[in-house]
Image (cartoon, helix red, strand yellow):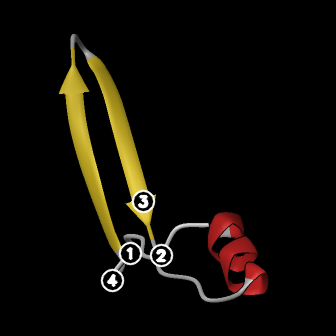
Amino acid sequence: MLSSYKTVKETGSHEIIIQKSRFIAHVNRATTETEAQHFIEK
């Protein structure tokens, strides 16, 4: 198992356009599976 790892500090989003294709990413910190599922449903 890893002794340390990186995690999400705060909610954010980013958009990038590559060759006329639009890619959008949304991230949110979740400490439980329920919180993660709620974010995915939004």
Secondary structure state at the residue bearing disc 1: loop
Q: Label 3, label 1: how many angstroms apart (C-alpha)?
A: 11 Å
* Marks 2 and 4 in Cβ contact (< 8 Å): no
* Marks 1 and 4 in Cβ contact (< 8 Å): yes
Secondary structure state at the residue bearing disc 3: strand
- Give the residue pinned by disc 2: 3
Secondary structure state at the residue bearing disc 2: loop
Count of residue discs: 4
Residue 9 location in percent, x, y? 32, 82
Numbered mark located on residue 10 in the image: 4
* Marks 2 and 3 in Cβ contact (< 8 Å): no
Quadrant holding the N terminus:
bottom right
* Residue kind at label 4, given as amino acid type: Glu
Q: Which numbered mark, 1 or 4, is in the foreground of this view?
A: 1
Apparent side of residue 18 relative to residue 37 in the rendered image (left or right) = left
- Give the residue pinned by disc 3: 26
* Residue kind at label 2, given as amino acid type: Ser
* Marks 3 and 4 in Cβ contact (< 8 Å): no
> Which residue is depicted at the point 74% across and 72% down?
37
